[in-house]
Amino acid sequence: MRKSARWTLAGAALALLAGAMAVPWPFAGPDLNGQIAQQLSAATGLPAQVGARVTFALLPSPQLKFRDVIIGDGDSPVRLEAAQVKGKLRLLPLVAGRFEVSGLHFQSPAIRINSDALAIWTAPPASAVSPFTGAVTIAGGQATVASAGREAEVIDDIDLTMNWRGVSAPSAVGGHGAWRGQQISLSALLGRPGDVLRGRSTTFTLDLKSSFGELKLDGDISIAPRFQLNGAAIASTGDIAALLKWTGYDASLANGVERVRATGNARILNNSLSLSGLALNVNDNLLTGTLTFLRDDGKPSISGTLASKTVSFDPRGTAWSSLLAGHDGSWSRELLPIGILSDLNFDLRLSTNSLRLGQISTTDAALTAMAKDGRIELSLSAARAYGGSMKARMSVLIDNETPRLRGQVQFEKLDAAAFLRDALAATRLAGTAAGDIEFRSHGYSIHEFVANLHGTARTSILKGALAGIDIDRALTQYQKQPLSMPSELRSGRTIFNRASLAGVVENGVLQLTEASGESDTLLMRFGGAVSLPARSLRIDIDAARPQPAQTLAPQTTAAASGVAPQLKLDLNGFWSDPELRLDVEGLISSSEAAAPLLRALKRSNGSPATPANTPANTKTE
């Protein structure tokens, strides 16, 4: 035989041998299957079984392919089922006739995690040491997390790689999956996996990322006798509404909140999360303190104590703006998301050096927010504001009936001009105010709460002024020339030493029951009503010169106090621009020349008709 032919035959033989070594050859036998199952059980600490069909290939690297693999049973906290698993084999043990797996690849496994069983799981014996080391990969897996009384959570498209170097060596995990429609990626490092399997704690780090936030943990973890993780935590999100929606809560809970970042020491149990040494940044407001999240009987609870140097929240330009006011400036008719709070319990306390809500500013404020069994209570127990102090309390009861509101506001030594400017954009009243307001209402929107408002209001103002009208000068002009009132009546200021106001609110309308003001040269009485739903007012003003030794009386008009009114004015219209009118009949009656003509006109008509009032900026002759 020629030499070239021999080389050709040798090459063909080698090719046939290589092909034969690369082709999977079927193996059968309970010893091999049992050996593989034993290695899987030793590696996981859970019972394992392998189907009867096993194939072996030597090239390109020694590997086994086995089917119908089940790890865990009905009582195990974790159960994995895979129709196909590939295992890499170590070469030296293979030469000695032993099969030792050095890597596992699970194709499309179904994983079921029972969190209730995990909480009471008994660790395997310490003597069960796994000989397995290598990489474990999962491709296209699906995990179901189940617990009694809760809807099962499903994580799809799991691609995961774990570098398993033994029970006493660090194990790294990295991968991604789809959870509630959101792509989640994670990387983690477990210090000593064997300690976790045996009910002890070990070091643990985790980095969890998604499109709307990131979570980092660095501490110790244990899963028996119950799950527990302690360590430093960092969590951040730039879209808190999307995060709430993803976790199953109403996104409207985050109205006005966008960016949140929290750092602190975390303690995570099966149904609770505690954060101490917390630094919480909400829309650039930094708060420090403690928070605890607890899920009990399916209802989440939040409790905590926080402190901050500055807290600022402006509902304008947020989702809250449409809930508070309509596009035309009227009270909003949109339904308030009150009902969602009935499914949440919370007890939160906040103290801050500076609190700003919209345009309203306070200092040294202490706030409490509580909700339990459908009852919500908000209180401002103490705050310095506008040169004085104020406190408020409000409660909302949510049950099968229409939501009901009750509240009380008290204030002392308040700079009325600054407060009304910031709270209502009103600039006409100044002085030092004190008083209290009590109210109750019911409804589903701001408009309904305002329209159904009932209560009482009482206030007093010292050393004040009413801008836009000079009643003192008008009264002087009126006494001299009643029919020649100054056209500039709606300019200047009316100064008073003290004023008082009391009223009753019914169906959103404030009826003045006692209102007066006085200075050294002026005595005023007010009557009428203010409509909160219509944002309008109708106020009657009687002005007179005080008589010697006369003091303010509780009556609503100067005439009732024994002093004949010398000037009558009417203030009517919307809050933004009310119209001031003069009592024309009073002007004519006070004129010696015109009064007889008015009386003659009444006699000729046979009626005590009263001429219509004339706007104050119209000159009467």
Image (spheres, rainbow, N blue to C red):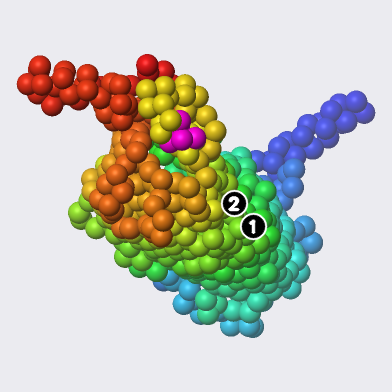
**Does residue 5 appear left or right of residue 195 in this picture?**
right
Q: Where is residue 100 in the image (x, y as percent from the top left)?
A: 69, 63
Q: In which quarter of the image is the N terminus?
A: top right
- Between residue 292 and residue 186, name the one nearer to us: 292
The magenta region covers 473-477
Q: Can residue 116 be seen in this view?
A: yes
Mark 1 and mark 2 residues within 8 Å of each other at the beta carbon: yes
Q: Where is residue 319 in the image (x, y as percent from the top left)?
A: 47, 37
Circle 1 packing at 10 Å, graded few (<14), some (14-19), many (20+), is some
Residue under pointer 1: 354
Badge 2 element: strand
> Which label was assigned to residue 361?
2
Circle 2 packing at 10 Å, graded few (<14), some (14-19), many (20+), is some
Among the two numbered marks 1 and 2 on one chain, the one whose residue lies closer to the N terminus: 1
- Between residue 141 and residue 466, name the one nearer to us: 466
- Between residue 475 and residue 547, name the one nearer to us: 547
Number of on-image labels: 2
Above or below, 483 against 21 in this view is above
Q: Where is residue 185 in the image (x, y as percent from the top left)?
A: 63, 46
Q: Can residue 240 be seen in this view?
A: no
| Residue at left offset 37%, top offset 16% | 621
